[in-house]
Amino acid sequence: MAALAAAWLLAPAPGLSATLEARVLGHDGAPLADALVQLSSRDAGIHLHARTDAAGLHVFRGLPGAIDYVLRVEDGTDAHATTVQDRIALKAGEVGRESFRLFPSILELVRVRAAREGRLVELTEVGTRTRYSDEFLAGLPVTCSP
């Protein structure tokens, strides 16, 4: 059955190719300009990269049909977390649309206490603490399993 589905997706359509629209938004829902968008497919032999426009959009045109496209989105800084969407299926003649909302990166701070006497760094007193914003937690994908 999988082979039949792959043949249907990859069947050449004369003069037709697939298109993928990638829209990137910041955590506040505003378009994220100049985000790096990378599209790849092992089956199609594709590895493309581009930047989003002022509307947070980039359109990949002229793509062959494939069922293994991977779209990776990042803002090019450490301010937002990188997002990856895999198993994107595109059929020749169709337009696929993927939308991403990038949230602030998780930053872990480590505080170390140093002492003048004894050991230079007291390793038993080193601790870490991670704080997540409510916005970040609200934006996490939720999946339910049976």
Image (cartoon, helix red, strand yellow):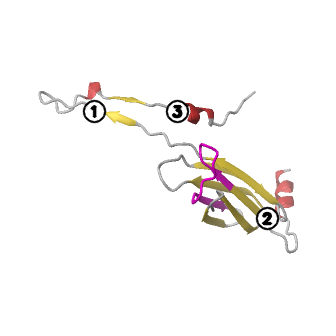
What residue is shown at x 26% (from left), y 29% (from top)? 123
What residue is shown at x 83% (from left), y 59% (from top)? 9
User: In the rendered image, which quarter is residue 39 located in?
Assistant: bottom right
Instruction: Identify the disc placed on residue 25.
Output: none
Instruction: Identify the disc placed on residue 112.
Output: 1
Q: Residues within 10 Å of mark 2 (few under 14, many from 20)?
A: some
Q: Earlier in the sequence, mark 2 or mark 3?
A: 2
Q: Position of residue 24 (x, y in %)?
A: 64, 52
Instruction: Identify the disc placed on residue 18.
Output: 2
What residue is shown at x 82% (from left), y 63% (from top)? 10
Q: Identify which residue, 29 or 52, lies in the foreground.
A: 29
Q: Residues within 10 Å of mark 3 (few under 14, many from 20)?
A: few
Q: Identify which residue, 49 or 31, lies in the foreground.
A: 31
Query: Which element carries disc 3, helix, strand or loop?
Result: loop
Instruction: Identify the disc placed on residue 133.
Output: 3
Query: Which element carries disc 2, helix, strand or loop?
Result: strand
Range shown magenta: 23-42
User: Is 137 displayed left or right of 94 in the figure?
Assistant: left
Disc 2 to disc 3, C-alpha distance? 38 Å
